[in-house]
Structure formats: structure tokens, C-alpha cells
Image (spheres, coloured by chain):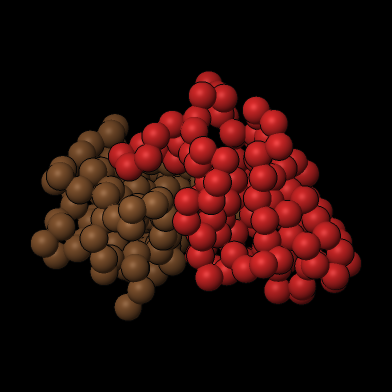
Amino acid sequence: SQQGEEDPQALSIQEGENATMNCSYKTSINNLQWYRQNSGRGLVHLILIRSNEREKHSGRLRVTLDTSKKSSSLLITASRAADTASYFCATDLNTGGFKTIFGAGTRLFVKA
Amino acid sequence: EPEVTQTPSHQVTQMGQEVILRCVPISNHLYFYWYRQILGQKVEFLVSFYNNEISEKSEIFDDQFSVERPDGSNFTLKIRSTKLEDSAMYFCASSAGLSGETQYFGPGTRLLVL
């Protein structure tokens, strides 16, 4: 597996339901970020969690980080049709320099 | 709210031609990045830049690529002799600090090499 893999690859839910996306990585990281991308558009930063943090909230978003399992999850509660997008995790590697690796993303479709 | 801007939004070029993609990072940011995203694929790291030099680069960032901060505001990516497989969306990003700082992305430049 590669650094930064999300699952599921695609997720379809009804409006109002919760959506959970997972990300796994392989190497030591400084922090992990989640981004949203609407089709063909730029990346919107959602939340950053540092390697010494375990959970973070921002509005309807909840992110967890388990460095022992090298995994993170993004939970979107009470989803809306406007949440339809691709969601990517990105890991900032602990390389001495700075290098960010993105996963392949989860495509979320929220049905109204 | 300050934002990263990129020009042009779209560029079409012939194979073998040189292209320069331009970015204006957020003004007080010190760290700059270029990424690319081939259609339907994931975002790939190309290069990071700090203090007027490259900090890290990926295996994609070979000799045909170069970056420059020619003045206090612009950050450019030059592709010297474009190939068909360089067709992609190119994103610039900037951050205020290093680890633990959010990277803010520009809207991207869609490059098409014919």
C-alpha cells in the first residue's frame, strides 16, 4: 500500500446520515490534513491534526488520529447534498524537509 | 480572507514548448509548494520551496522542471520541454510555517499538452 490510502474509494449516503472516511499511512508523520475537492476545482483545507493529537473537531467534522495504527478517520455528521465531493487525506512526512503526500481520495455522494 | 492565486487558469501548449505557471502565495507565507493532479488521479507532490531554495522534490520533479521566486510575490513553475504526459492540473500552495501549519491551495492551472 502507498502512503495515504483512503477507504472507501466511494461512498453514497442519504442526506442527514453520517459519513466516515478512513486514511492509512506507512511512515512517520508530523501531521495529517484532510482536504475536500469539488469536481475539477481546487482543494479546500478542512482540518489539520498534529501527530501528538488524537481527536479534533470543526463544526460537523470530527477527525481522529491513531499513530500506533498509522490511521486517521474523518467523520462528517448530518451530511448535506453540498458535502458531495472528493475527500483526501494528506500526510506531512517527517523527512527533515517538507513533503506532503496525498491519498487517492474518497468520493462522497450525498443524495438529497 | 487572503488566498493563493494562480495564472493562467488554463493553458494549451504544443509538445516540446516551454510553459511557465505562475502563483502568488499568501503574502506573509514562507513555504511554497507545487502539486499536480492528472485527470481522475490523486494529487501528487512535486516540490517544496523555502528561503529561496528547494527543500524537497519528488521523483516526478526531474530536470525539465524548475521553480523560482523571482520577486517578493510570485512563485513560478517552469516546464522546459513539455510532454503529453505533463497534461494535468497544477496546484500551488503556501503555508506560514513548516510542520503543523495549514497549506492553502490555489485554484489550479489546467495544462493541456497537444
The answer to whether residue A72 is visible is yes
- Count how many numbered circles sit on residues in the image: 0
Q: Nearer the viewer, residue A87 or B34?
A: B34
Determine the residue positioned at 78% across, 67% down.
Answer: B82
The colour one sees for chain A in the rendered image is brown
Q: Residue B100 location, x and y as percent?
A: 31, 39
The colour one sees for chain B in the rendered image is red
Q: Residue A5 is drawn in which quadrant? A: bottom left
Q: Residue B75 location, x and y as percent?
A: 65, 40
Q: Residue B6 is drawn in which quadrant? A: top right
The answer to whether residue B43 is visible is no
Q: Is residue A51 left or right of residue B64?
A: left
Q: Nearer the viewer, residue A51 or A71?
A: A51
Q: Residue A62 location, x and y as percent?
A: 23, 43
Instruction: Reply above or below: B25 against B35.
Output: above
Instruction: Reply above or below: B91 against B41.
Output: above
Q: Residue B81 is drawn in which quadrant? A: bottom right
Q: Nearer the viewer, residue A51 or A11?
A: A51
Q: Is residue B37 left or right of residue A93?
A: right
Determine the residue positioned at 53% across, 51% down.
Answer: B54
